[in-house]
Amino acid sequence: MEESNETLSVGIDLGTSRSSISASNGERHVIDSYVGWPVDLVARKLVKKSVLVGRDALDNRSMLELRRPLERGVIKEGSEKDEEAVQELLRHLISLIGIKQKGKNRPKVRAVVGVPAEAFRVSKQRLRRAMDGIADSVMLVSEPFAVAYGLEALLHTLIIDIGAGTADFCVMQGRYPTEQDQRTLPDAGDGIDEQLAKLLREHHPDAQFSIHMLREWKEKWSFVGEPSARVLVTVPAKGKATELDITNEMRAACESILPPVCETMIDLLTRVEPEFQEKVRNNVIISGGSSLIAGLPDALEKALLELGGGHVTVVKDPIFAGSDGGLAIARDATSSDWEKLSL
Ligand SMILES: Nc1ncnc2c1ncn2[C@@H]1O[C@H](COP(=O)(O)OP(=O)(O)OP(=O)(O)O)[C@@H](O)[C@H]1O
Ligand SMILES: [Mg+2]
């Protein structure tokens, strides 16, 4: 009965390809960031729902108007349907942790939502609108900051969150990061997928594949640097099952993000106060799904040699690092923090 006064804290990582939620009631969930509406009467009869979210939407995509509403981590410009889709995603995440939309006993929900480092100004209003009716108070924080907070890597660290839509950088100097401490690049997993598709089309024009197949191959065999084994896939070519060696294409596609990522990493490091630069260089942490590319830490360390060397580690739990961090912020924030931090 007292539940109506209860406050539930949640951290949400709203991602281009996956979104996760961590809640103070112990629930943790991750969904694919897809939303779909049945295209017609037949589809509606088959799927028996007015809207499908996550894997459900992806698996039934032939019957749906399918949306992946977060492009480069922000709600796509000028699309009401995408705004609606983001709201469905958020609603679904909240329902997964056992919270009903309405009702007397519904606890107050305080949500910290991680968004790409530079998305604040562009998307904050849209995001707030989408959160309306879903949470009672909201705080938007940059994604890598949420990761840093969750890891308690708050001093002399550089967090690089490489997801699907964006690579987000944040230098932590023991205080709330400013604009100068953060960067966002559009070079991440989706860019690798596009590059891989382009190279395969050029080198194997008869091969038939979809972006979903490509992504699966990448998630199994992505790498940068010297290959440890050949990457072999079987695809239809003019309908005939054919084995392809895609090792070189995989390497080139994955390595396509290295120059911009290394350049931004070095640029941010050179802006750190001189006496702390070495510390930060030795505390580079990468997170996000694309941080799982084999050989990536070594490649970044190689780039750090230019500055005198450094150390790069991959976060232990890349799927929940952002939402767990958001939850930690929500738990620690006092009411004045909510006002101060929300932008
Ligand atoms: N083992 C892997 N190797 C390479 N890439 C991977 C691997 N596992 C996942 N990915 C890629 O990571 C990306 C998803 O990562 P993540 O869930 O961190 O992104 P997101 O949070 O949805 O995106 P963003 O933060 O850009 O909005 C996808 O591009 C996916 O293909
Ligand atoms: Mg992300």
Image: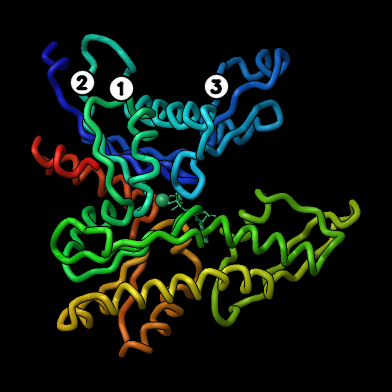
* Other residues around mark 2 within 10 Å, as few (<14) / some (14–19) / many (≥20): many
Side of 326 relative to 41 (left or right): left
* Other residues around mark 1 within 10 Å, as few (<14) / some (14–19) / many (≥20): some
Residue 334, compared with residue 145, is above or below; it is above
Residue 107, numbered circle: 2
Tell me what residue is drawn at x 44 percent, y 64 percent: 291
* SS class, disc 3: loop
Tell me what residue is drawn at x 33 percent, y 60 percent: 316
* SS class, disc 2: loop
* Other residues around mark 3 within 10 Å, as few (<14) / some (14–19) / many (≥20): some
Q: Which residue is mark 1?
A: 99
Residue 50, compared with residue 221, is above or below; it is above
Q: Earlier in the sequence, mark 1 or mark 3?
A: 3
Q: Hey, which quadrant is residue 21 in on the image?
A: top left
Q: For ligand 1, tell me if the residue under mark 1 lies within 8 Å.
A: no
Q: Give yes or no for contact between labels 1 and 2 (Cβ–Cβ under 8 Å).
A: yes
* Amino acid type, label 3: Val
* SS class, disc 1: loop
Tell me what residue is drawn at x 48 percent, y 71 percent: 260
Residue 87, numbered circle: none
Q: Give yes or no for contact between labels 1 and 3 (Cβ–Cβ under 8 Å).
A: no
Side of 30 relative to 173 (left or right): right
Tell me what residue is drawn at x 72 percent, y 50 percent: 210
Side of 81 relative to 59 (left or right): left
Q: Earlier in the sequence, mark 3 or mark 2?
A: 3
Q: Which residue is mark 3?
A: 51
How far across and how far down the image is residue 76, in percent? 51, 40
Q: Earlier in the sequence, mark 1 or mark 2?
A: 1
Separation of marks 3 and 2 at Cα, in angstroms? 25 Å
